[in-house]
Amino acid sequence: MPKSYETDLALADHELVVTITGELDLTARPALTDQVTDEAEKRGVGRIAIDLGQVTFCDSSGLGALLDIRQAADDDDIALVLRNVPPQVARLLDLADADGWLARE
């Protein structure tokens, strides 16, 4: 199954900035989770910022990927924040009552 999203990873002051473009769906969950958590561990960052400004679609699997990343970050004592959350993703986060798990900037 082809990948429905692209990522750009950048390091800034012990923060891994992950910019996601495209669709967060079933195809994204395992690969995105592995990519972000592996990079955060390799770089020894203290915080992960996921920029969702270019996300065009997010379903429950995409939400699952974000929660998987959050869990892995918690396991490694790494803070996680979501940035530039588009309205359609914000609605999903609100419906899932995910604010206690996924902080937004």
Image (cartoon, grey):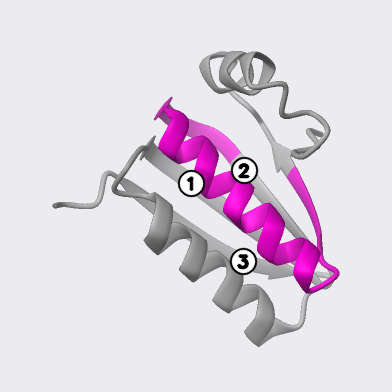
Q: How many numbered dots are placed on residues in this image?
A: 3
| Left or right: where 1 falls relative to 94 | left
**Residue 20, labelled with which disc?**
1
Asked whether, in this view, residue 53 is left or right of residue 71, the answer is left
Q: Which residues are magenta?
A: 52-81
Q: Earlier in the sequence, mark 2 or mark 1?
A: 1
Residue drawn 83% across the image and 33% down it: 100
Label pair 3/1, CB-CB below 8 angstroms: no
In the rendered image, residue 40 lying in the magenta stretch gets the answer no
Q: In the image, is 81 to the left or to the right of 68?
A: right
Q: Is residue 97 above or below residue 28?
A: above
- 14 in relation to 8, above or below: below
Q: Earlier in the sequence, mark 3 or mark 2?
A: 3
> How far apart in space, not on screen, are marks 3 and 1 (Cα)?
12 Å
Pick the front one: 55 or 30: 30
Q: Is residue 31 above or below residue 89?
A: below
To which residue does mark 2 refer? 51
Amino acid type, mark 3: Ala
Q: In the image, is residue 77 above or below residue 26? A: below
* Disc sitting over residue 76 in the figure: none
Residue depicted at x 64% and y 86%? 42
